[in-house]
Amino acid sequence: MSMAELRTTADLWDELLETDGSPRAASSELVQQLKGLGLAELQQRQDLAELDIVGMGITFTVYSDGRGIDRAWPFDVVPRIIGADEWRLIEQGLAQRLRAINMFIDDVYHEQRVIGDGIFPAELLAHSVNFRKECVGANPKFGVWAHISGSDLVRDGDGTMYVLEDNLRVPSGVSYMLENRAISKRAFADLFAKQSILPVDAYTDELNRMLTSIAPDGVTEPTIAVLTPGIFNSAYFEHSFLAQRIGAALVEGIDLVVGDDDCVYMRTIDGLERVHVIYRRVDDLFIDPEVFREDSTLGVPGLMRAWRGGNVAIANAPGAGVADDKVVYAWVPDLIRYYLQEEPMLPNVPTYRCVYDDERRYVIEHIDELVIKPANGSGGYGLLIGNLASPTELDEAIGRIEADPRNWVAQPTLSLSTVPTLCDGALEPRHVDLRPFILSGATSYVSAGGLTRVALRKGSLIVNSSQGGGSKDTWIVEA
Amino acid sequence: MLLSRVADNLYWGARYMERAEDTARVVRSFTDLILDLPLGVASSWEPLLAVAGSRQEYDAGHARVQESDIVRFLVADPSNGGSVVASVAAARENLRTTREVLPREAWQAVNDLYLFTSRDTESGVDRRSRARYLGRVMTDCQRLDGVISGVMRRDQAYELWRLGQMVERADMTTRVLGVRAATLLSATESTDDHDEVQWMGVLKSVTAMQMYQRSQRGPIEGTSVVRFLLFDKTFPRSVAGCVQRMRSALSRLPRAPDTLPAVDQMEALLATLPAQSDDGVALDAAMDRVQAALADLNTRVYETFVSGTA
């Protein structure tokens, strides 16, 4: 493989290579090996990895003709690498972010000091589709609501790592992070032997520890259950994988029942058995038909009663999603300063909130450079990419913003960083993002790296596996 | 702790895998047998349908009774729930929902077999590749069994798996006895030179050939074959051996007093069978009664562990 075959793209940051094509410090071993291997050998390792994936039954589910179809998990053998020094800062930044977000959620369901002190506008909360009035006054342990979160990170052309969004409801992907490592250890065993790459396997043990820590008072060895919508859910593989790894029961709504004592039980071959902690992978609105959607068959009648009574812990807590939308996202840096009296360590993508006069003026003046997004997150309606829009479209957008400023935010367009990726027998730069997983309970923990998703089509920024995206292992390397 | 829903899937997962293995074995041994019989000796493929217990389903979709159609139906037809490919696919679906209680290698073994059986189903029908295809099915089923024996805790999930396996296995042995052995016994008056080959076929269809010969002296002889397959508890595919293992599994599962009477009933039934049974008609009828008792046990297992109606 010649140098010319490891390409970068002008103005884009490559995770493995400097702009002149030489390796970055943390990726020098890998790049050296890639050059030594040649494309044919690399392709062979890719093919073996794909065989492993099929053989290990690592799948995700897509829907076609109303039927769920199991697809092999898409994986690219060339890893994405981050230096350990940079990673430690990201880790601290994520932990800081989640501390503030959890304090915000707890505040919002109690005194709402953040509104009283003029930090967060009351009318935005009033319009939040994810605020659950049924959760007001609830007291989950440690004041933690978002126990498991997956924040998406992207790196811009100048190398700055930004938080793109916080997934606080039922973020998925962590099982693929673990499986990708198992596969990449086979593909690059020699590199794992030669350098220090942080292991990722501790995640499930930390998950178990966190779930144990939030058990109802007095329960030291809780029975834990993973609540899944069932085998037709696209993330069923992951639900099953996690239950297996933490020794929890994998339950569906029909397996659970809330007794007259407001405790949760599961139906076993011995009869009913008490459940203390539920790691739910079912959306809020479906977990309890007595309180939320009556037509839900995925939930458990009475579950909210049991939770509010402190008889069962639910992760993530119902209502945690209130902090998971574009509105709250735009305020997170302010929330960090407000609750923690600290400066944010990880930047947000600059987000202009049209509800504030000065930010709105900036948006209107620079509208052709910005992406305009509806803040209430109702689908993609109204999303406008400034540099692609016609003058008429821009004028209309300005009209919509002035009519209802509260409903709009704007961000500059980012250029996602790239990683060399095997495409049709050649190594091509392709865009990636990164989803680390953050656990919050008695203490907090950040996964070593996360799930790197890659857009396999040239120029594409779409990394979702359901839309042709792939994945890579993420190596945190001590340089 | 074992969820009722998971218990049901495990029990049936085990039954499907055992069915795949047993069906593969009877088809392979029957193919071997027919090739051994000289031309002119009646060599119909019909008994195979009866052993598989699928005569009615077959007749519903097929006008003719011929080798390729029968073998395709029993091995490669996904619409026949008892076929090898359908059993493996059903086992895999069941195991997908029990992955958290079975060892990881167990899922991989089933997944591998599923990928193999569904890839080139016609090679399980073609005479030239059939033995190899069916051999792979049997080996993979045994690989799964090895994983379960070798790495699984003897917990409730394990016992339910064994229970399902033994119920299905006993079902197959009784069908082999009720169809093939009974037919041969009824025909003993005729001085057929190929009797011995036929009885060997019976033994091979439940992998009993070598073990039978180690336990007996002298040439293969009909009534001793029947006795071996019915009563020899040391042979894990004999009816009595399966029933004994069902008892041990149920004794270790909750609410044994609700389920064990069905095993008592089966043992009582076996005890009434004459030890020197050489009456084909009586043997066939007796096997029907054992199968009814197996169906009864199946219902009790469901009511006790799954529906909670027992």
Image (cartoon, rainbow, N blue to C red):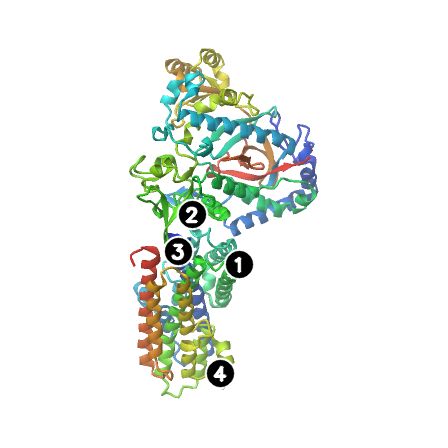
Residues flagged by tags 4 and 3 on a common chain: yes
Foreground label between 1 and 4: 1
Query: Badge 1 is on which residue?
Result: B151
Three-letter code for the amino acid on which mark 2 is drawn? Leu
Question: Decide: marks 4, 3 in contact (CB < 8 A)?
Answer: no
Query: Badge 3 is on which residue?
Result: B7
Does residue A183 lie above or below B197 as drawn?
Answer: above
Query: Badge 4 is on which residue?
Result: B216
Give the CA distance from mark 4 to mark 2.
50 Å
Work out whether residue B96 can be spotted: yes
Seen at 46% across and 74% down, the residue is B235
Label 2 crowd bin: few (<14), some (14–19), many (20+), radius 10 Å:
many
A75 with respect to A61 (left or right):
right
Q: Position of residue B261 (x, y in %)?
A: 33, 68
Residues flagged by tags 2 and 1 on a common chain: no
- Chain containing the residue with disc 4: B
Three-letter code for the amino acid on which mark 3 is drawn? Ala
Could you tell me which secondary element the residue under label 3 belongs to? Answer: helix
Seen at 34% across and 28% down, the residue is A133
As rendered, which of A218 and B80 lies closer to the eye?
Answer: A218
Work out whether residue A325 can be spotted: no
Label 3 crowd bin: few (<14), some (14–19), many (20+), radius 10 Å:
many
Displayed quadrant of residue A324: top left
| Quadrant holding the C terminus of chain B | bottom left
Residues flagged by tags 2 and 3 on a common chain: no
- Chain containing the residue with disc 2: A
Three-letter code for the amino acid on which mark 4 is drawn? Gln
Foreground label between 4 and 3: 3
Res A250 label: 2
- Chain containing the residue with disc 3: B
Could you tell me which secondary element the residue under label 2 belongs to? Answer: strand
